[in-house]
Image (spheres, rainbow, N blue to C red):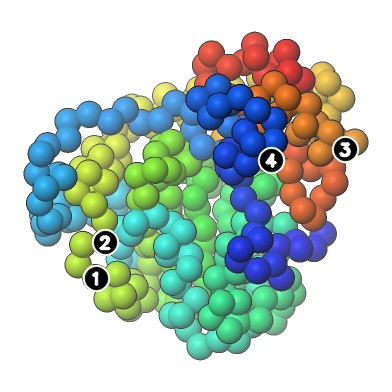
Amino acid sequence: MADSSENTPKSQRDHGGGLDAAVTLFGGNRAGWMDLSTGINPEPYPIAGLKTDDWTALPDSQSQAELADAARAFWQVPEGAAILPAPGASALIAALPALAPAARVKITPPTYNEHAAGFQAHGWQVTPTSPAEARVLVHPNNPDGRYWHESETNARFCVIDESFCDISPDRSLIHLAERPGTLVLKSFGKFWGLAGLRLGFAIGDPALIDRLSSWQGPWAVSGPALRIGARALRDFDWADATRSRLTQDAARMDKMVLAKGATLVGGTPLFRLYEVEDAKVWQDRLARAHIWSRIFPYSKTFLRLGMPPADGWDRLEAAL
């Protein structure tokens, strides 16, 4: 299946979210809507313990080192790999194609469309086939949840986007991060539910990380993000409990939606991808109940739903 977003101008690239437009079309107010279009954990990591200095002082080297140390321990980063915190994984996705001379990059559709857009903006030719000088793998893939094998990471320049992989750390390809030419991306907006914090990580080849770091400047990550990120990455109990809850919620979601005539295509415990007869009809029906879902420009039958908050399940079932 071709991903039509690969050739779409930036201003027209589609994403989850966009709740303001849904409110305009279907009424109500933003606070009254339930947004299931993004795959963001609806029960985010609790924010507490911020200090005044986190807001008023420039981030110091100690707080940056503490975050990097916590990330290394949580993700079991190989000793030979370097870690770069950044203001969101999206900022890294936009910058990293400049790390290698423009050539051919293999990106297998359908997948997250910002990767193709970022490479195209830097003059690369995006192709779904080999041979190619670069490779991008979203692991697990968005929107179908596919996991990739490390045998598929054999390009000279390889980007492994693990934005959703915190739900399945046993499937991570982080052990490849010390390999030359390899970068693994991590996001704080999905599993941790803190998309507005704008915190992401590039982990991998120290030479590539050094170049990315020089482009960012000295204070790319905010003081609050440094403190919250370090605390969250040390909270293994919260992570374990969250994985268990999300797994149960995904099973509950499948049972509910399949009973309405959908077919499960794939997904992760943070989002499910279903095939329905007419995805736009389903989206509109949910939107009339002020529930926003995700459909795709390259498929008339794919519907993606994120997990609802604890008090949203009855509302979702009634809308379906």
Q: Position of residue 51 (x, y in %)?
A: 12, 37
- Disc 3 to disc 2, C-alpha distance: 43 Å
- Check disc 3: other Cα within 10 Å, few if <14, some if 14-19, many if 20+: some
The reply to whether residue 250 is visible in this rendering is no
The one of 26 and 101 positioned closer to us in this rendering: 26
Locate residue 236: give its quadrant. Answer: top left
- Mark 2 residue type: Ala
Q: Residue at x 51, y 58 (%)?
A: 161
- Disc 3 to disc 4, C-alpha distance: 13 Å
Q: Which mark is residue 217?
A: 1
Locate residue 257: give its quadrant. Answer: top right
Q: Secondary structure at mark 3?
A: loop
Q: Which mark is residue 12?
A: none
- Mark 1 residue type: Gly
Residue with the mark numbered 3? 278
Asked if marks 3 and 2 touch (Cβ < 8 Å), the reply is no
Q: Is residue 40 above or below residue 48?
A: below
Q: Position of residue 203 (x, y in %)?
A: 37, 62
Q: Secondary structure at mark 2?
A: loop
Q: Which mark is residue 294?
A: 4
Q: Secondary structure at mark 4?
A: strand
Mark closer to the chain start, 3 or 2: 2
- Mark 3 residue type: Asp
Q: Is residue 165 above or below residue 177?
A: above
Q: Secondary structure at mark 1?
A: loop
Mark closer to the chain start, 4 or 1: 1
- Disc 1 to disc 2, C-alpha distance: 6 Å
Asked if marks 1 and 2 touch (Cβ < 8 Å), the reply is yes
Residue with the mark numbered 2? 220
